[in-house]
């Protein structure tokens, strides 16, 4: 079964809100103007089977995050087909759905439900979530008094307790201490072993090598290469050193 | 040339129960955030209608001698004020309901219509508090509640539908044109004066009456008054246009949301 299939997916951004709205309605009638910015152009991508791990690499602004957002359903493509089978959990920016004035407890419920859990599911997993995040003493404290690391840990912990089929990960390891990073890497591996597929965006090629089987290399919104991790990473590195020399 | 045709297939679809739970959570947390770390908490909801009822009774009844029929003026004005406060609160709360959640909307896929809806539901908590005020006035003036009061539920249903439609339109419009957020306090003030909050609709000059009945708040406020203490069903020459406008607003609000919610996250 295809977990994710993207066929000829393109996404265009315009300068102003009104133009975006007009373009959205009438794009098929107007000819493309020079100020249209295509963040994605004709991207094809397939992730099939369970426990599959796909990485996305590319320079800043190459469309990696846009592609993740299209797959997450946060935004719609301008054209193309997107098929997603299974519960998608985004780890795009941890703690994004959290509110600083709500307590840790309230945030766990709100964020858990936002990510697709039912209330009784959150209640059942509550202790496990708190324990993984390591913030049990601070449950009734507003989130604004948490440290950045604590907020991130709580966000990560809620997200991994959703019974996901597909994880979308965007540079989630930036924060958190070494111990937490090691635990989250281990958690990712455990989830892969349980059949969770993942899509990982990272600039850290070491992590890409560790956590992916296949890699999609994006360059200015187009697919530069798609294949087994090692060969794509090699050609990406080769292209980068080539560019540095010239 | 690329065509603007896209197809999205997702399974499993979000269940209705989950959607309702999410709506409830969003509404609940809105209420708890709004009055967190305030000294008076829900007392603030009381303050405005109570103060305005006193002021209106003094200025418009004692001073300007605005008639209120057989009903004590304070009760007459308070009914209008409670209905109006609900409208004003919903609109001012929901206008920023989508724009305030920009961080969330860029990261998590959720039915975006839940954001204005949760603002509407959160405001119903305020309504509950205000109704206590109204009951207090009924008891104080010993006005018997007539049997027609059951009609109030129907008027409320129209009122609620109008508010849902308006909050969808306003919250979405504010995404595309931030002017809306600036204009709303002003527009609400204008709307307040053309709605029969502190005067009866029968006082509207004849030449404006045709226009006034197309203001849905005319039909709704007069509807509440008619059923609560006049003891008559809502007057249909006011209520009819109000229902018609409400249906149009609701349909327009939902249609706009369906059409545009896919690009909201791009322009926030």
Image (cartoon, helix red, strand yellow):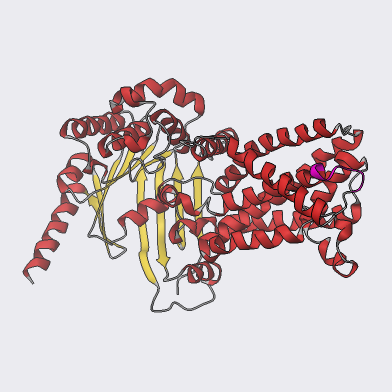
Q: Give yes or no for residue A62 being in the magenta stretch.
A: no
Q: Is residue B123 left or right of residue A122?
A: right
How far from the left and from the top, in percent, is residue A226?
Answer: 26, 54
Single out the residue that lies furthest toward the front.
B63
At horizontal 54% and vertical 35% (from top left) the residue drawn is B41
At horizontal 6% and vertical 68% (from top left) the residue drawn is A245
Identify the image quadrant of residue B44: top right
How far from the left and from the top, in percent, is residue A207?
Answer: 18, 43
Q: Is residue B150 left or right of residue A132?
A: right
Which contiguous range is marked in magenta? B69-75
- In depth, the one of B118 and A32 nearer the eye is B118
| Residue B179 higher or lower than B168, as above or below | below
How far from the left and from the top, in percent, is residue A27?
Answer: 51, 71
- In depth, the one of A70 and A147 nearer the eye is A147
Quadrant in the picture for the N terminus of chain A: top left
Q: Give yes or no for residue B73 being in the magenta stretch.
A: yes
How far from the left and from the top, in percent, is residue A46?
Answer: 36, 49
At horizontal 44% and vertical 59% (from top left) the residue drawn is B266
Residue A102 visible here: yes
Residue B121 visible here: no
Q: Is residue B15 left or right of residue A42?
A: right
Quadrant in the picture for the C terminus of chain A: bottom left
- In depth, the one of B154 and B52 nearer the eye is B52
Single out the residue that lies furthest toward the left.
A245
At horizontal 36% and vertical 56% (from top left) the residue drawn is A66
């Amino acid at each position: 079964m295809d977990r994710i299939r993207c066929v000829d997916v393109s996404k265009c951004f315009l300068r102003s809100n009104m133009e975006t709205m007009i373009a959205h309605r009438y794009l098929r009638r107007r000819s493309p103007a020079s100020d249209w910015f295509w963040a994605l152009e004709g991207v094809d991508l397939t992730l099939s089977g369970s426990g599959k791990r796909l990485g996305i690499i590319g320079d800043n602004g190459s469309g990696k995050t846009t592609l993740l957002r299209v797959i997450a359903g946060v935004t719609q493509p301008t054209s193309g087909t997107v098929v997603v089978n299974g519960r998608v959990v985004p780890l795009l920016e941890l703690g994004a759905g959290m509110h600083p004035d709500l307590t840790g407890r309230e945030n766990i419920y709100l964020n858990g439900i936002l990510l697709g859990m039912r209330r009784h599911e959150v209640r059942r997993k509550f202790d496990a979530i708190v324990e993984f995040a390591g913030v049990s003493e601070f449950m009734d404290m507003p989130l604004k008094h948490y440290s950045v690391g604590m907020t991130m840990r709580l966000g990560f912990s809620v997200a991994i307790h959703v019974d996901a089929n597909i994880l979308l990960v965007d540079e989630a390891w930036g924060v958190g201490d070494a111990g937490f990073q090691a635990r989250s890497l281990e958690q990712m591996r455990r989830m892969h072993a349980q059949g969770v597929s993942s899509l990982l965006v990272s600039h850290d090629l070491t992590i890409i090598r560790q956590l992916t089987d296949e890699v999609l290399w994006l360059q200015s919104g187009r697919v530069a290469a798609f294949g087994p991790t090692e060969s794509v990473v090699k050609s990406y590195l080769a292209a980068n050193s080539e560019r540095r020399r010239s | 040339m690329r065509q603007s045709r896209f197809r999205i297939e997702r399974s499993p679809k979000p269940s209705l129960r989950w959607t309702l739970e999410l709506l409830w959570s969003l509404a609940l947390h809105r209420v708890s955030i709004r009055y967190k770390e305030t000294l008076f908490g829900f007392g603030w909801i009381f303050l405005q209608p109570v103060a305005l009822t006193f002021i209106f009774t003094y200025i418009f009844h004692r001073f300007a001698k605005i008639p209120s029929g057989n009903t004590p003026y304070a009760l007459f004005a308070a009914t209008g004020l409670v209905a109006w406060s609900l409208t004003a609160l919903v609109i001012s709360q929901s206008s920023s309901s989508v724009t305030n959640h920009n961080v969330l909307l860029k990261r998590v896929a959720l039915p975006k219509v839940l954001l204005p809806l949760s603002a509407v539901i959160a405001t119903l908590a305020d309504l509950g508090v205000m109704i206590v005020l109204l009951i207090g006035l009924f008891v104080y003036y010993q006005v018997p509640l007539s049997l027609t009061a059951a009609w109030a539920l129907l008027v409320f249903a129209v009122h609620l539908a109008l508010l849902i439609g308006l909050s969808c339109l306003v919250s979405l419009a504010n995404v595309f044109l931030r002017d809306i957020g600036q204009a709303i306090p002003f527009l609400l003030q204008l709307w307040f004066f053309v709605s029969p909050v502190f005067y009866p609709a029968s006082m509207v000059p004849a030449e404006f009456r045709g226009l006034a009945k197309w203001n849905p708040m005319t039909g709704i406020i007069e509807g509440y008054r008619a059923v609560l203490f006049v003891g008559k069903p809502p007057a249909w020459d006011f209520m009819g246009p109000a229902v018609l406008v409400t249906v149009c607003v609701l349909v327009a609000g939902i249609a706009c949301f369906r059409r545009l919610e896919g690009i909201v996250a791009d322009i926030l």
